[in-house]
Image (cartoon, rainbow, N blue to C red):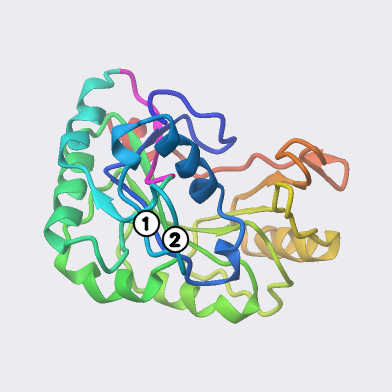
Amino acid sequence: MGDRSTIEWTEATWNPTTGCDRISPGCDNCYALTLSRRLKAMGVAKYQTDGDPRTSGPGFGLTPHPDALTIPRQWKAPRMVFVNSMSDLFHAKVPLDFVRQVFQVIAETPQHTYQLLTKRARRLRRVAGELDWPSNLWMGVSVEDAEHLDRVDDLRQVPAAVRFLSCEPLLGPLTGLQLDGIGWVIAGGESGPQHRPVQEEWLVEIRDACNHAEVPFFFKQWGGRSPKSGGRELDGATWDEMPPRLAVAAQ
């Protein structure tokens, strides 16, 4: 995890914290939890703290890493940076002061555009007013089914430059999804040995809602045994729409 990423909608990953806990069905087959087990067995220092076996696992205990705060300052060329691909910055165990330090690093590296994603939308909304929001930060929430559409309402209260949704793994229809105040939507199916199949009509409904609201739509994958098993075409097209990179455009 670092200077380069294979995730289709970003270019690099940065993990100032690692570890997490399951909180909803979208977490059931978490790739980061599986990867953390391997990293712990390999002796990687950041993955030696075990989490609660009921909600987490080996190497996946929530851990802030102050030494990781210097990493983006070493990247001179502008890049899209996914923050915490292996954790959730708005987990209750992450001190608010540490969240502020992460935001400060983002503000001090305006050559990059940062994408920060959380399932803890309620805490995000509650602390948003206590944070200074950099103009190069995109803030998103994960929404895997209609039971978690309340996360979108929480996100709308956050003063981020771009608010986005990650509907991946999509586990059910998002009928009734409202996109006012939302600037980008990612959607995709689940991958891995235990993957749960996504239905085409769920994806088309989201795509059409984005088109109607003039919101960029990014279809990441159909999923399957591996992320590339089903390809990336929806209705015979590849959907790679994204908002403008505000940080780069501002220079």
> Circle 2: is it few (<14), some (14-19), or many (20+) Cα within 10 Å?
many
Q: Residue 156: in sight, yes or no?
A: no
Image quarter (top left, top right, bottom left or bottom right) of the N terminus: top left
The residue indicated by pointer 2 is 56
Q: For the residues marked 1 and 2, what is the alpha-carbon distance in whole angstroms?
A: 13 Å
Residue 42 among magenta residues: no
Amino acid marked by disc 1: Asp
Residue 84 among magenta residues: yes
- Disc on the earlier residue, 1 or 2: 2
Q: Residue 224: in sight, yes or no?
A: yes
* Vertical comparison of 242 with 53: above or below: above
Relative to the observer, which residue lies in front, 96 or 62? 62
Q: Residue at x 63, y 74 (%)?
A: 177
* Vertical comparison of 176 with 139: above or below: below
Q: Choose mark 1 or mark 2, whichever is in front.
A: 2
Relative to the observer, which residue lies in front, 99 or 179? 99
Horizontal arrangement in the rendering, residue 141 relative to residue 248 (left or right): right
x, y (%) of residue 47? 35, 41
Horizontal arrangement in the rendering, residue 80 relative to residue 66 (left or right): right
Q: In the image, which residues are magenta? A: 77-85
Q: Residue at x 21, y 42 (%)?
A: 65
The residue indicated by pointer 1 is 88
Amino acid marked by disc 2: Ser
Horizontal arrangement in the rendering, residue 214 relative to residue 153 (left or right): right
Q: Mark 1 touching mark 2, by CB under 8 A? A: no
